[in-house]
Image: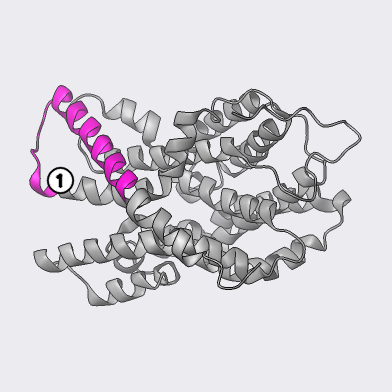
C-alpha cells in the first residue's frame, strides 16, 4: 500500500510534466456517471409507473443522461493528462481502441444476434453501429439502434481519431490564456441549444445531444482543463465544493427549457468537478472516490455502461409487468446486480485479455 503524495510547493506546477500521476478518484467517479445513466434508463423504461415513486425517480435520475457529458469531458482530460512529449499519437489511440473496441464488438454482436432472432434487427443500423458511425446519422433508429448506449462510443471514436490534431492546437495556447480557452468552450457548449432552436425537434435533439461535432466541445474542454492543472493554474476549489456544485447543476438542469437541460446546464459544474478530483489525488487531499470499492466499480463501469440497457430490455420483454413498489424495487436491484455481474465478466474475460493482447510489444523496447 503506497502512501498518499505530499502536497506540492506553491511555487511548483501542480502536475510535473513527466510522468503523469495516477488519478484513482476519476476512476471512481466514472461509475457514478454510469450509474446515473443506468437510473435514467430505468426511469425512462417506466418500471416505477403507477407505484407512486415516479416523482422521486424524476428528481434523482431525470437528468441522468447528463452523465455522458462527464465521460466526454473525462476523455479529453485523461488523454491530455497522459500525453507525453515524444510518444507517437497512434500509441494513445491504440490504447483507447484496445479498451473500447473489444467490449463494443462483443456486446454489439450479441445484441444484434438477439434482435435478429426476435425479428427486430435492422441491417443498416447494425453495420453503421458496428463501425461506430451511428452518431453521424441524424435518424434516431440509427443512432440509438441495436445497443443504444454505444452512440456515445461513436463520438468517442471521432475524438480519438482527431486527438493528435486537437492536442497540437491546444498545446499552442499559452498558459496565461488557458482559462480564457476553457471559459470560451463552456460558453460555446451553453450556446449550442440556442443555435439549434430553429431546427425541427428531432434534428434539434440530435444536434445538441448526439452530433459528434457539438459534443467535441466538451472533449476539447477536458483537454484544456488538463493543461490548466498541469500548468499549476487550477483554482483553489476543494473536491467537496466541486461535488456540491455538480449536484446543484444536475438538479437545476432539469428545470431548464427545451434542450438546454441536456448538456448546457451541467457543463460548468462537471468541468469544475473533474480537475478538482484530479488535484485531490495529486495533493493527497481527502476523496471518497479513491477507495478500493469505488475504483473497482470505476474499472468495470465501461462494461456496465455497455450492458445495462441490454439487461433492462430483456427484463422488459420477459419479466413481469404492472408490479407494485416493492416489486419494482426488487426488479431494479436485480437489474443492477445482473448488469454488474455481466460487466465484471466482460471486464475480466474480454476487456483485460484484449488489452494485454493488443498492447503487447511487437519489438524490444
* Location of residue 178 with respect to 85 vertically, above or below: above
Residue sitting at 22 percent across and 45 percent down?
312
**Could you tell me residue 8's position as x and y percent?**
82, 32
Specify the quadrant that holds the C terminus. bottom right
Residue highlighted by disc 1: 316
**Could you tell me residue 54's position as x and y percent?**
27, 29
* Location of residue 155 with respect to 36 vertically, above or below: below
Displayed quadrant of residue 14? top right
197 or 307, nearer to the observer: 307
The answer to whether residue 360 is left or right of residue 275 is left
* Location of residue 195 with respect to 70 vertically, above or below: below
The answer to whether residue 62 is left or right of residue 359 is left
Q: Residue furthest right?
A: 11
Work out whether residue 198 can be spotted: no
**Most common secondary structure along the magenta stretch:** helix
Q: Is residue 324 magenta?
A: yes
**Element marked by disc 1:** helix
Could you tell me how many numbered marks the image carries? Answer: 1
**Could you tell me residue 133's position as x and y percent?**
42, 72
**Could you tell me residue 336's position as x and y percent?**
28, 36
Residue sitting at 66 percent across and 49 percent down?
186
Displayed quadrant of residue 288? top right
Mark 1: few, some, or many residues within 10 Å (few <14, many ≥20)? some
Work out whether residue 310 can be spotted: yes
* Location of residue 156 with respect to 45 vertically, above or below: below
Task: Give the residues drawn in magenta, as a range.
Answer: 316-345
Q: Is residue 332 magenta?
A: yes
Residue sitting at 87 percent across and 31 percent down?
9
226 or 136, nearer to the observer: 226
Specify the quadrant that holds the N terminus. top right
Judging from the image, the colouring scheme is one colour
Residue sitting at 75 percent across and 61 percent down?
170
Amino acid at each position: 500500500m503506497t502512501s498518499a503524495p505530499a502536497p506540492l510547493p506553491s511555487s511548483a506546477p501542480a502536475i510535473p510534466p513527466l510522468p503523469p500521476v495516477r488519478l484513482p478518484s476519476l476512476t471512481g467517479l466514472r461509475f457514478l456517471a454510469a450509474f446515473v445513466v443506468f437510473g435514467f434508463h430505468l426511469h425512462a423504461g417506466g418500471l416505477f409507473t403507477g407505484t407512486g415513486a415516479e416523482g422521486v425517480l424524476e428528481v434523482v435520475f431525470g437528468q441522468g443522461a447528463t452523465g455522458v457529458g462527464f465521460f466526454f469531458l473525462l476523455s479529453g482530460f485523461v488523454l491530455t493528462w497522459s500525453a507525453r512529449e515524444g510518444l507517437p499519437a497512434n500509441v494513445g489511440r491504440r490504447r483507447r481502441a484496445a479498451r473500447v473496441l473489444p467490449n463494443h464488438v462483443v456486446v454489439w454482436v450479441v445484441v444484434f444476434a438477439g434482435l435478429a432472432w426476435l425479428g427486430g434487427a435492422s441491417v443498416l443500423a447494425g453495420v453503421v453501429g458496428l463501425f461506430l458511425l451511428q452518431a453521424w446519422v441524424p435518424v434516431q433508429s440509427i443512432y440509438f439502434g441495436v445497443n443504444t448506449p454505444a452512440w456515445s462510443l461513436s463520438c468517442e471514436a471521432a475524438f480519438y481519431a482527431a486527438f493528435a490534431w486537437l492536442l497540437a492546437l491546444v498545446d499552442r495556447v499559452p498558459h496565461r490564456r488557458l482559462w480564457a480557452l476553457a471559459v470560451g468552450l463552456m460558453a460555446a457548449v451553453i450556446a449550442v441549444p440556442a443555435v439549434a432552436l430553429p431546427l425541427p425537434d428531432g434534428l434539434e435533439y440530435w444536434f445538441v445531444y448526439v452530433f459528434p461535432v457539438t459534443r467535441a466541445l466538451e472533449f476539447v474542454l477536458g483537454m484544456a482543463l488538463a493543461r490548466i492543472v498541469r500548468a499549476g493554474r487550477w483554482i483553489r476549489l476543494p473536491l467537496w465544493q466541486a461535488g456540491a456544485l455538480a449536484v446543484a447543476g444536475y438538479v437545476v438542469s432539469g428545470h431548464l427549457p427545451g434542450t438546454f437541460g441536456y448538456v448546457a446546464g451541467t457543463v460548468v459544474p462537471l468541468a469544475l468537478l473533474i480537475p478538482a478530483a484530479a488535484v485531490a489525488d495529486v495533493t493527497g487531499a481527502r476523496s471518497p472516490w479513491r477507495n478500493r470499492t469505488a475504483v473497482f466499480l470505476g474499472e468495470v463501469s465501461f462494461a456496465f455502461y455497455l450492458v445495462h440497457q441490454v439487461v433492462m430490455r430483456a427484463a422488459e420483454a420477459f419479466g413481469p409487468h404492472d408490479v407494485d413498489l416493492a416489486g419494482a424495487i426488487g426488479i431494479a436491484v436485480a437489474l443492477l446486480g445482473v448488469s454488474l455481474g455481466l460487466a465484471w465478466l466482460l471486464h475480466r474475460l474480454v476487456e483485460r485479455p484484449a488489452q494485454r493482447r493488443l498492447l503487447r510489444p511487437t519489438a524490444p523496447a
